[in-house]
Image (spheres, helix red, strand yellow):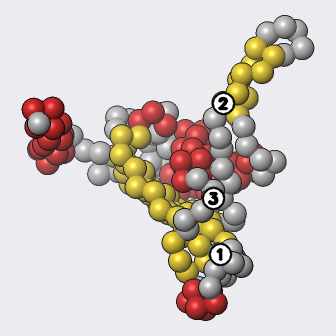
Amino acid sequence: MSEISFFVAGLPQTQAGMRDVPTKNGGRALITTGGKDLKPWRKKVKQVAELAKRNTPTLTGPVEVTYRFVLPMPSTRPVALRRQGIDWSYSKPDLDKLARAIGDSLSDAAVYGDDGQIARSVIAKVVVHDRSLCGVEVVVRQIPDTDDTRAYLLALLERRRSMLRG
């Protein structure tokens, strides 16, 4: 099974949706909405992904992506948690917006052809007291077409049918 994994150090950035804006010549353009640090973050993710990918061919078919975001701990956390050094992140930024910036960067790095290939994902975010530990760990795996994965899909289908029957 093909797998690519890497860690990108830094402060993860969010990427919101696309926005339709008018252009000077009367046309329309789609722009990505995000902060001023989004472009440098995506560029860094792309560069690290390309290094991790090395000679691995672009993944085709369904893929699974695991994202583990490590963010700075807010100073409002209780002292005991700050001493412990790590806790779950249960406030902004939104997980889906963090993952969106990574997904597009992986497409740009040709890890896979398009982020529409992501058929399954696991996303987590934690906060740490030591800001030098911030970043994102990414693991991309090809989902193999095996008897096990077929059995998983058929079990999903059967659960859905059973829900409909009541």
Q: Secondary structure at mark 2?
A: strand
Can residue 87 be seen?
yes
Amino acid at dot 2: Met
Pointer 1 local density, CA inside 10 Å: few below 14, some 14–19, many at least 20: many
N-terminal-most mark, 1 or 3:
1
Alpha carbon separation for disc pair 1 and 3: 12 Å
Q: Nearer the viewer, residue 1 or 89?
A: 89
User: Residue at the location (68% across, 54% down)?
Assistant: 13
Tag 2 residue: 18
Q: Is residue 147 left or right of residue 16?
A: left
Amino acid at dot 1: Met
Pointer 3 local density, CA inside 10 Å: few below 14, some 14–19, many at least 20: few
- Quarter holding residue 75: bottom right
Q: Tell me: residue 16, above or below residue 94.
A: above
Alpha carbon separation for disc pair 3 and 2: 20 Å
Q: Could you tell me which quadrant the C terminus lies in?
A: top left
User: Residue at the location (51% across, 72% down)?
Assistant: 88
Which residue of the protein is positioned furthest toward the right in this rendering? 24
Q: Residue 73: which numbered mark, if any?
A: 1
N-terminal-most mark, 3 or 2:
2
Tag 3 residue: 92
Q: Are marks 3 and 2 in contact (CB under 8 Å)?
A: no
Q: Residue 90: which numbered mark, if any?
A: none
User: Residue at the location (72% across, 22% down)?
Assistant: 20
